[in-house]
Amino acid sequence: MEKSARPRTALNECVKVVVRCRPLSDREKNESYEEVVKVWPERGAVQVYNPKGQDKLFTYDAAYDCSSDTKTIYDEMVRPLVASVLDGFNGCVFAYGQTGTGKTHTMEGNGDDEGIIPRTFRHIWAHIENTASPDVTHLVSCSYVELYLEDVRDLLSKECKKLTIRGQELNGFYIPEMTSIVCKSASEMVRLMRAGNRNRASGRTDMNEHSSRSHAVFLVTVETAHRSTNRIRVGKLNLVDLAGSERQRKTGASADRLREAARINQALSSLGNVISALAENSPHVPYRDSKLTRILQDSLGGNSKTIMIANIGPASYNYDETVTTLRYAHRAKAIKNKPVRNEDPKDAKLREYQAEIERLRSLIEQR
Ligand code: ADP
Ligand code: MG
């Protein structure tokens, strides 16, 4: 994006933090685990009972209990963010939490509870259909990458090609060789998400274990051109399902496993360090410490509107992990972003396409 195209002043906007508590699982019910989490949706508050001491109470932009569905979270929190992306802002929704607390359930969905990612696709295409006119052209493109042990893999390429992040562009991270597929409908985007997930799973003996150890980033870019004004707006949206935030158990793990665990935790602790540095207004923010934080650089403290969804479980045996997640999420509330509308960025694909169309048109006219 050209520097001159960016307005000098951007209004600060805090990262919005949402907590979602899943219901007790059947196993937890059968084993009669006590519930230690109480959600106060009307106050955006979450209370955790501490059998040994004082209860803990945290407040957020919103808190959802085990009876809430993803539709409500989408309509109340995510819909306005996607509307901004359609208006040329960058956005990010990321799910954080211990394995088994509902990150994938929230982002991708499960059975009848459609996730945030497919809801976003439908929202984008409903908007495109509702605003269709001869004056407007839209271009929607998708990429899907996975981060595992500091490797970035292209889930939409053959054999999940390894990718290199090249510097930080003004308008988001930049991975030159990342596959970007132009889509024509919400169902096509869902098919891409599923194809990427199959690639993610292929060759893995235990997909659940792998997905709890890797981060998945689905990137949607929406370009909108108005003929009458000759302006192009570009909104980029990162939809992120992070690796499980639990501390890796040391018991019984092999040396290889421990090294792997340390590196997985390193990306999430880098994320924690970035969040702390931003929350404390520190002059140095250690984005470069991991690929995850490089990819999320704009989403945290930069040109983006961002929602963090912290997923927790209600059972007593998760008490420590739950409190850790709630503290982490609480810190993220202090992060201030500076979102600006991306108008006429250099990397707009529509501009290239329009130039190509003009070139072909003039070739036809010359004949
Ligand atoms: P994660 O991705 O955080 O490891 P999952 O999304 O795979 O967790 O969820 C673990 C299990 O809990 C799944 O069986 C999922 O269907 C169930 N689950 C998670 N959140 C909810 C919810 N809000 N309501 C009902 N079931 C849920
Ligand atoms: Mg998952």
Image: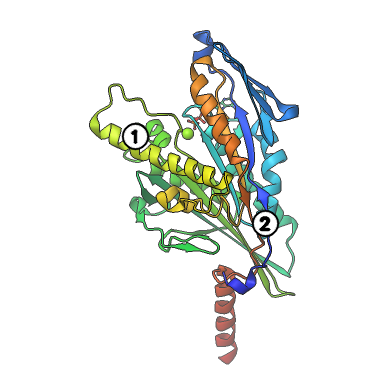
Q: Nearer the viewer, residue 56 or 26?
A: 56
In the image, 344: left or right of 151?
right
Q: Secondary structure at mark 1?
A: helix
Q: Secondary structure at mark 2?
A: helix
Residue at 64%, 47% (x, y): give it. 122
In the image, 168: left or right of 14?
left
Residue 40 drawn at (x, y percent)? 71, 24
Residue at 55%, 62% (x, y): give it. 171
Nearest to viewer (mark 1 / mark 2) = 1
Q: Nearer the viewer, residue 67 or 47?
A: 47
Total labels: the figure holds 2
Residue 261: assigned label: 1
How far is disc 1 from disc 2 in space, using C-alphas?
Answer: 38 Å
Residue 229 drawn at (x, y percent)? 73, 74
Task: Tell me which amino acid carries mark 1.
Answer: Ala
Task: Tell me which amino acid carries mark 2.
Answer: Leu
Residue 218 shows in the view: yes
- In this view, the residue farthest toward the left is 255
Residue hosting label 2 = 86
Q: Is mark 2 within 8 Å of ligand 1?
A: no
